[in-house]
Amino acid sequence: MKAIAVFPAGKEVRLIEKEEPQLVKPAEVKLRILEVGICGTDREIVAFQYGSGPAGSDHLVIGHEALGVVVETGPAVARVKPGDLVVPMVRRPCPHEFCKACRSDRQDFCYSGDFTERGIKARHGFMTECVVEDERYVVPVPGELREVAVLVEPLTIAEKALSQYRVVQQRLPWEIRHSPDDDLRHTAVVLGAGPVGLLGSMALVASGFKTYVYSRGPASDPKASLVESIGATYVATQNASIERLARKVGNIDLVYEAAGASRAAFELMKVLGTNGVFVFTGVPGRKAPVELDTDLIMRHLVLKNQLVFGTVNAGRDSYEAAIRDLGVFMQHWPDAVRSLITGRHPIEAYREPLLGKPRGIKNVIALHGSHG
Ligand code: BGC
C-alpha cells in the first residue's frame, strides 16, 4: 500500500510502498483511510523541524488528521463495526506508572512527555491506505458528516480549549450566561484565520460568544466573508490596531490564539479584558527574542484577574464534542464549512499541498475516492 513518509537522515519526503498492516490483538480494528488533512505541524515535519519516527525505523509515515472507514474488527471489538466511519485519535499514552494523566486515559495532559503521537512522534501516521488501531482510539462519526469529517481533529483543539474555559470560568460565582441579548453575551477574539482559527470561531459562535476574528488578510479576503457568513466579525490587522480592536469589542472575555505568532499574541494580551482568559493553541517556531512590556502585562494579569493557558492535543470528550459541533455547523452554515476544504488531492500529488506554498485553508489528501 502507498504511504507518504519522511526520511530524516537523508532529508527526504517520499511516496513509499508498505506492507498492509493486519489485526494482531482482539480489540483492534482495521481502517481504510478516506481522507487526511494537512496542517502546519505536517509542514514542519516535512521541513525536518519537528517530529520523529518510531524507534528503529528510518522513516515516519506522516498524517494525523484522518477520516477512515472500518473494514475489519477483532473478536473483542464492541464499539464499531465494518462500514462505520471513524476519526482516529492522535496521541497514545506514555508507559509510566507515575503519569496520572496517561493512566486516566488523558494522554493529552501527559506529565512525562513520553507519549507518542501518530504521524508526529514515534508512531506512524495516517497518510496511507490502511491502518490498524485499538478500538479505544477511534471515534465513530455519523455518515452524513462524511464530506467534512476530516475537520474533526483540528476542531478538537478548539473543543478542548472551550471546555477548559468553561471550567476555569466557574471561578466567577455568578456563572457565565450566554444570552441572545448582545450586552450579556461573552466576547471572544480569535487571533488568526487558518483552519484552527476558523473552526474555533464556529465553535465560539455556536456556543453563544460574540466573536471577532483578528487576522492579517485584508477585508476583501474570502476568509473575511466566510467569517461574516457565520455571524462573526472580521477585523483586518491592517485596518485596526489592537487598541482600536479593543474599543470595538469592549471587554474581551476570551482570546483564542490560533496564529502561532508570539509577538502578535502578546500584543493582544495587553487588551485582554477584566476576568478575561487568554488561550494559546499555536506552536511558534523559534525566532529571535522580542521586546515586551512585561510590567503592563503583569499588572493587568493581577489587577484584572486574568488567566492565561496553553492547550495541546485533545481527549476523547473533545473528539465527541467536535463531531457533535460539526453537525451543528453543517446545519447552520453548510457552505462555510465546506469552503474550509480548499482542495482534495490524490496521494500521488502530495508534493504541492505538503511542500509548496500554503494555499487556501485546508488541503486534504483523498484516498480511495473522488478528488477535485
Ligand atoms: C496536533 C496535535 C498534537 C500537536 C503537537 C498538532 O498539530 O493536532 O494532536 O498534539 O500537533 O504535536
Image: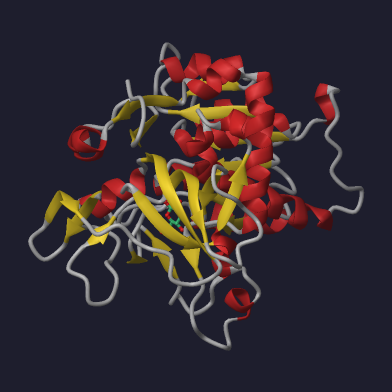
Residue at the outermost bottom position: 97
Residue 270, visible in the rendered structure: no
- In this view, the residue in front, 349 or 275, is 349
Relative to 45, is 73 on the left or the right? right
Query: Measuring 86% from the left and 38% from the top, which residue is drawn there?
Result: 177
- In this view, the residue in front, 56 or 8, is 56
Please state the total of marks drawn on the protein image.
Answer: 0
Relative to 6, is 95 on the left or the right? right
Query: Measuring 11% from the left and 66% from the top, which residue is drawn there?
Result: 9
**Rendering coords of residue 98 (x, y %):** 58, 88
**Rendering coords of residue 313 (x, y %):** 52, 57
**Rendering coords of residue 358 (x, y %):** 27, 32
Compared to residue 23, the image places residue 4 above or below, namely: above
Residue at the outermost right position: 174
Query: Measuring 63% from the left and 40% from the top, which residue is drawn there?
Result: 323
- Where in the image, quadrant-wise, is ligand 1 located? bottom left
Relative to 115, is 167 on the left or the right? right
Residue at the outermost front position: 75
Residue at the outermost left position: 10
- In this view, the residue in front, 332 or 234, is 332
Query: Measuring 29% from the left and 30% from the top, which residue is drawn there?
Result: 345
Quadrant where the C terminus sits is top left
**Rendering coords of residue 175 (x, y %):** 88, 47
Colour convention: secondary structure
Residue 22, visible in the rendered structure: yes
